[in-house]
């Protein structure tokens, strides 16, 4: 399989392929309950400022969480990945705590096996 020949029906240059992709995207929007929704560029443009604001907040929160997790790891002697996993397990909903506890217990057993295997 090589580059497509522009003389073939499915071939074409990059501009032609991009044009067809754009035409297809204009026709095929998001599906909601089986109904296709036509993309609304004006509505997206109006909403983008809010999306950008939320993404910036998300990025700042991720940076703050990462800094805090690293600091806790340094203070406690645990790897940051372990601190992150413990934090996620601790924030689990009450109804799923039993499942989280069971997974933690099994993971502990599995890690004990790995630790003894490495010796």
Image (cartoon, rainbow, N blue to C red):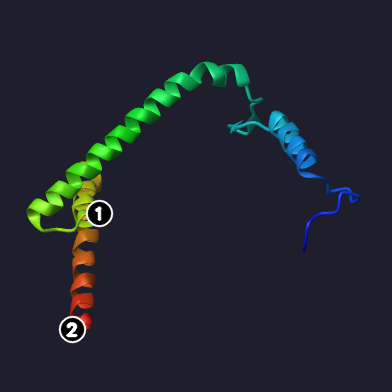
Instruction: Tell me the number on the disc at residue 99.
Output: 1
Nearer to me, 37 or 43? 43
Q: In this view, does 23 lie to the left or right of 105?
A: right
Q: Where is residue 50 in the image (x, y as percent from the top left)?
A: 43, 20
- Would you name the residue on which mark 2 appears? 119
Nearest the viewer among 32 and 95 is 32
Residue 83 place in picture, x, y as percent: 18, 52
Rendering coords of residue 45 (x, y %): 55, 19
Side of 62 relative to 27 (left or right):
left
| SS category of the residue bearing label 2 | loop
The quadrant in which residue 118 appears is bottom left
Can residue 61 be seen here? yes
Does residue 23 appear to the left or right of 35 in the view shown?
Answer: right
Measure how far apart labels 1 and 2 are at the Cα level. 31 Å
Dot 2 alpha-carbon crowd within 10 angstroms: few under 14, some 14 to 19, many 20 or more? few
Q: Name the quadrant containing residue 117.
A: bottom left
| Neighbour tally class for label 1: few under 14, some 14-19, many 20 plus, Cα within 10 Å | few
- Of pointers 1 and 2, the one earlier in the residue sequence: 1
């Amino acid at each position: 399989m090589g580059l497509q020949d522009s003389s073939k029906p499915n071939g074409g240059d990059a501009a032609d392929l991009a044009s067809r992709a754009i035409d297809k995207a204009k026709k095929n929007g998001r599906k909601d309950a089986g109904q296709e929704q036509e993309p609304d560029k004006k509505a997206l443009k109006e909403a983008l400022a809010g999306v950008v604001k939320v993404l910036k907040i998300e990025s700042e929160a991720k940076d703050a969480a990462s800094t805090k997790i690293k600091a806790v790891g340094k203070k406690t002697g645990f790897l940051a990945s372990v601190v992150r996993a413990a934090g996620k397990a601790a924030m689990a909903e009450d109804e799923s705590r039993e499942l989280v506890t069971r997974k933690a217990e099994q993971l502990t057993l599995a890690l004990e096996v790995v630790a003894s295997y490495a010796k």
